[in-house]
Image (spheres, grey):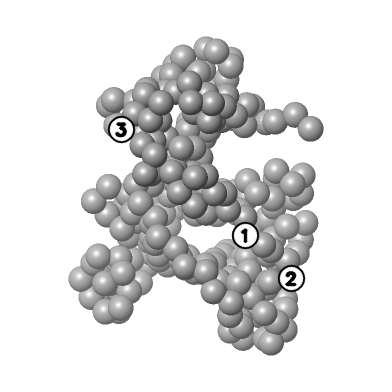
Amino acid sequence: MSLPVYGQVKSFIKAHISSGEWKPGAPVPSEATLMQQFGVSRMTVNRALRELTTEGMVTRVQGSGTFVAELHRIASNLTLRDIQEEVLERGHLHAARVVLLQAEKTNAELAKRLGLRPGARVFHSVLVHLENGVPIQHEDRYVNPAAAPTYLNVDFTQTTPTRHLLAVAPLTEATYSIEACLPTQEQAKQLNIAVGEACLAMVRRTVSGPHVASVVRLVYPGSRYSFEGKFQP
């Protein structure tokens, strides 16, 4: 099966890095050069570079360009993927159901995680993502308004919070943890599973420049989803 166009750009860059032709710290061809070489849009090139950045293969420096990552930056990574892209790449239909989208005040614990003062205003969204009509992810997210001021105006049945945040608050750092869990009654209801069904939960905190952009808890039915990572020595 042929690669999608952004995948071809990505594969081209990875091949030159993996072969050693492009050394750590060496510049990667500019977006304009890659656009001309592959005959694609800036958005397509940007997606390829964004995924390579998340995977630790390259680093992007604003105003300077993209460079091959230093060796110490290449490690075991869980790629930050957009659930909609994952579903579409499998040739399936993605849909999202918005359960909650509103502004709230933080409690002390959440404020600390977002780097805000207690009682500060934050945006709170709860979505359920479906693949071919079957719920596969419960997304409970808090967003810093300073990082994404128009968050509450976005139609999340047409795009995803992840995609919107990557566009308006480019990722500079992310931390995550994964654990087995049981769903709450509300999560089980939204995912259409039994309360006793085993799930996987990812808690992820993303940073964009000077701001913590969001803190999200993603719950997946264990029978419907698996995580994939990539290791490069």
- SS class of the residue under badge 1? loop
Side of 85 relative to 24 (left or right): right
Q: Is residue 73 above or below residue 105?
A: above
The quadrant holding residue 88 is top right
Side of 1 relative to 206 (left or right): right
Q: Is residue 197 above or below residue 204?
A: below
Q: Is residue 109 above or below residue 98?
A: below
Residue designated by label 3:
61
> Which of pointers 3 and 1 lies earlier in the amino acid sequence?
3
Cα distance between the residues tagged 2 and 1: 12 Å
The percent coordinates of residue 161 (x first, y second) are 49, 54
- Residue type indicated by callout 3: Val
Residue designated by label 1:
227
Q: Residue at x 29, y 31 (%)?
A: 62
- Residue type indicated by callout 1: Phe
Q: Residue at x 69, y 71 (%)?
A: 222
The percent coordinates of residue 215 (x first, y second) are 40, 64
The percent coordinates of residue 209 (x first, y second) are 27, 47
Side of 98 relative to 42 (left or right): right
> Which of pointers 3 and 2 lies earlier in the amino acid sequence?
3
Q: Which mark is residue 223?
A: 2
Q: Residue at x 58, y 16 (%)?
A: 38
Cα distance between the residues tagged 3 and 2: 40 Å
Q: Is residue 207 above or below residue 17?
A: below
The quadrant holding residue 205 is bottom left
Q: Which mark is residue 51?
A: none
The percent coordinates of residue 130 (x first, y second) are 69, 60
- Residue type indicated by callout 2: Ser
Q: How many marks?
A: 3
* Residue 203 in view here: yes
